[in-house]
């Protein structure tokens, strides 16, 4: 049981995945800050001063009833930028690398059961032959 777990952990894919998660989380924080600092003010300016940016209050005298559409748009932008960077920086190069690595390897030839049996018989007969090379 532990041997299988060790083999799973030592595979390159697990290490690549761990690196991708760490880099993705760090990059998401950077993108979040850029969007909050640059995009949010622009979206709030587009909403106008009367509605508090792109916020809309259901009950006008209660600030806890505001629906913040700018925050939703920001979250979508952060998600799309993070997903695009992870894809183009991590996923696409790994796919190209795996494709180039697999190009040199050809798929093993599928052999029918009859052919495999005939090959076994041939190999057994080859071991029984005398050294003189005279056949049957």
Image: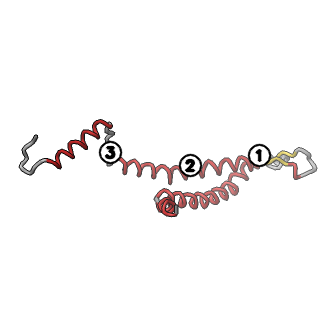
Residue at 65% x, 51% y: name it: 78
Residue at 48% x, 56% y: name it: 13
Q: For label 3, count other residues whose C-alpha is less than 10 Å away and answer few (under 14), some (14-19) or many (20+).
A: few
How far is mark 3 from mark 1, CA to CA? 53 Å
Name which of mark 2 and mark 1 comes first in the sequence.
1
Name which of mark 2 and mark 3 comes first in the sequence.
2
Callout 3: SS: loop
Q: For label 2, count other residues whose C-alpha is less than 10 Å away and answer few (under 14), some (14-19) or many (20+).
A: few
Residue receiving disc 3: 106
Quarter of the image for residue 18 reads bottom right
Residue at 23% x, 42% y: name it: 121
Quarter of the image for residue 47 reads top right
Q: Position of residue 4 (x, y in %)?
A: 49, 59
Residue placed most toward the observer, 128 or 37: 128
Residue receiving disc 1: 69
Callout 2: SS: helix
Q: Position of residue 119 (x, y in %)?
A: 24, 41
Q: Position of residue 113 (x, y in %)?
A: 32, 37
Residue receiving disc 2: 84
* Left or right relative to 60: residue 117: left
Residue placed most toward the observer, 95 or 136: 136
Residue 45, relative to residue 117: is it above or below? Answer: below
Q: Which mark's residue is nearer the viewer, 3 or 1?
A: 3
Residue at 31% x, 39% y: name it: 111
How far is mark 2 from mark 1, CA to CA? 23 Å
């Amino acid at each position: 049981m532990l041997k299988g777990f060790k083999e799973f952990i030592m595979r390159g894919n697990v290490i690549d995945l761990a690196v991708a998660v760490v880099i993705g989380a760090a990059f998401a924080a950077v993108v979040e800050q850029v969007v909050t600092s640059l995009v949010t003010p622009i979206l709030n300016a587009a909403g106008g001063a009367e509605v508090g940016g792109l916020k809309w209050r259901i009950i006008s005298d209660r600030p806890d009833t505001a629906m913040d559409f700018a925050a939703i748009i920001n979250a979508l932008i952060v998600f799309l930028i993070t997903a695009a960077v992870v894809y183009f920086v991590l996923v696409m190069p790994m796919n190209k690398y795996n494709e180039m690595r697999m190009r040199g390897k050809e798929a093993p030839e599928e052999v029918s059961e009859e052919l495999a049996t005939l090959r076994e018989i041939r190999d057994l007969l080859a071991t029984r032959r005398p050294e003189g090379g005279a056949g049957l």
